[in-house]
Image (tube, rainbow, N blue to C red):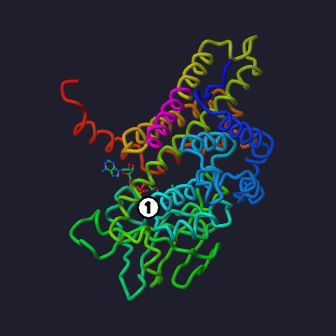
Amino acid sequence: MRRLTDTDGLTEFQRDILRTVRDFVDAEVLPVASELDHADAYPDGIVTRLKELGVFGLTIDEQYGGLGESLLTYALVVEELARGWMSLSGIINTHFIVAYLIAAHGTQEQQDFFLPKMATGEVRSALSMSEPDLGSDVAAIRTAARRDGDDYVISGQKMWLTNGATSSLVALLARTEEDAGQPHRNLTAFLIEKAPGFGETRSGLTVPGKIHKLGYKGVDTTELILDDCRVPANRVLGEAPGKGFYQFMDGIEVGRVNVAARGCGVALRAFELAVTYARSRRTFGKIIGEHQAISFKLAEMATKVTAAHQMMVMAARRKAAGGQSDVEAGMAKYLAAEYCKEVVEDSLRIHGGYGYSTEHEIERLYRDAPMLLIGEGTAEIQKMIIGRRLVRDYPAGA
Ligand SMILES: Cc1cc2nc3c(=O)[nH]c(=O)nc-3n(C[C@H](O)[C@H](O)[C@H](O)COP(=O)(O)OP(=O)(O)OC[C@H]3O[C@@H](n4cnc5c(N)ncnc54)[C@H](O)[C@@H]3O)c2cc1C
């Protein structure tokens, strides 16, 4: 029988990459993931191996030392990594979005300067929009940048930076002064270099400490405080002030496909654990998988994993083909996140009391899954995007 997340129409090279990543996950991630998660420890050793495998440069053009692979290949790699440990997909996701933003919107100088170092993983990146008082409502950003000669001077507070400490490049959205009356036209994207670590990592730029989370452990999530942080004007993404909102929303669409892929990976693992357990646990004289209530649950779970995977692949292919794909990315993210939560809960239930023990892998997945309902836009925000476009653009008379 085929794996639930097998994908049709891949090249031999894509299959080779996925096989390599899957073998790596089985041999080097799954055996240590729960231990690292419980210790909330950054997986330095695994990150070194991800660099060696070329994962940080997977989608970066070959001329910059990357593998030049498609969004689909990337999403399928993310699915495999998330099957092993969702936090790994967090370590590469913001890096991948920033590389995408620079490739799609950066100047030639920015591409030449950043992309080769990003392809090797020497420079790793964070992406910063959210603030203490806003996440969904990006246009309300308060962090402000004012022009001062050849620089911008930025002040404000940012929240929830995945890789905030381990990164040495932050793509950050701040309010600038052009077209002040238009909330979407006075946001500017900055590429800010900094030292990795906590404390003052660049003059005027402080990473105070780690935010402690329910799950999604190991990967650092931080605040960021900017106090008259001076950034050269040539570090405005594309040297295009006032275009940050549109640039970031483009980046977030690929991020949504990525979150969908994480959901598929986590759900697949939850299913694998459930079916394995259902074959071995016996009650009332038979394995629990032979009780109809459990086999129906497994059938529903497998259907959800398959449906989410197919939707994610469709969204990745549409986005990679160019053009607007906010609806597809939003649907894929929404469906995969919701199904993941349901599949993980069903898997935990199938494990009975052992599902509640920290010695069984499913408890980690149960703590990781809710993050997918929030990151890159909550379920409500996905439905707003999808619904608004349906009402506006769906063909009349259909
Ligand atoms: C672990 C983690 C990592 C993160 N990493 C990053 C990162 O790297 N970079 C970054 O910039 N951000 C990051 N975020 C922030 C994340 O993107 C936001 O938390 C998310 O967008 C939601 O924003 P919020 O928390 O401010 O909730 P709010 O926007 O305050 O929303 C609160 C609730 O109200 C609902 N809601 C809001 N507006 C509407 C509306 N118009 N209609 C109906 N319902 C609505 C929401 O769906 C939600 O249920 C991260 C968050 C977490 C938890």
Asked if residue 152 lies left or right of residue 25, the reply is left
Q: Identify which residue is drawn at 52% across, 34% down.
A: 313
- Tell me where residue 162 appears, x and y as whole percent: 56, 60
Q: Which residue is mark 1?
A: 105
Q: Nearer the viewer, residue 351 or 310?
A: 310
Question: In the orientation shown, which residue stands out farthest toward the bottom?
Answer: 149
Asked if residue 187 lies left or right of residue 358, the reply is left
**Which portion, as a residue range, is magenta?**
306-321
| The C terminus lies in quadrant | top left
Q: Identify which residue is drawn at 75% across, 46% down.
A: 29
Amino acid type at image mark 1? His
| The N terminus lies in quadrant | top right
Does the magenta run of residues contain 316? Answer: yes
- Tell me where residue 274 appears, x and y as whole percent: 67, 27
All told, the count of numbered labels is 1
Q: Is residue 72 above or below residue 101?
A: above
Asked if residue 356 lies left or right of residue 382, the reply is right
Asked if residue 16 lies left or right of residue 146, the reply is right
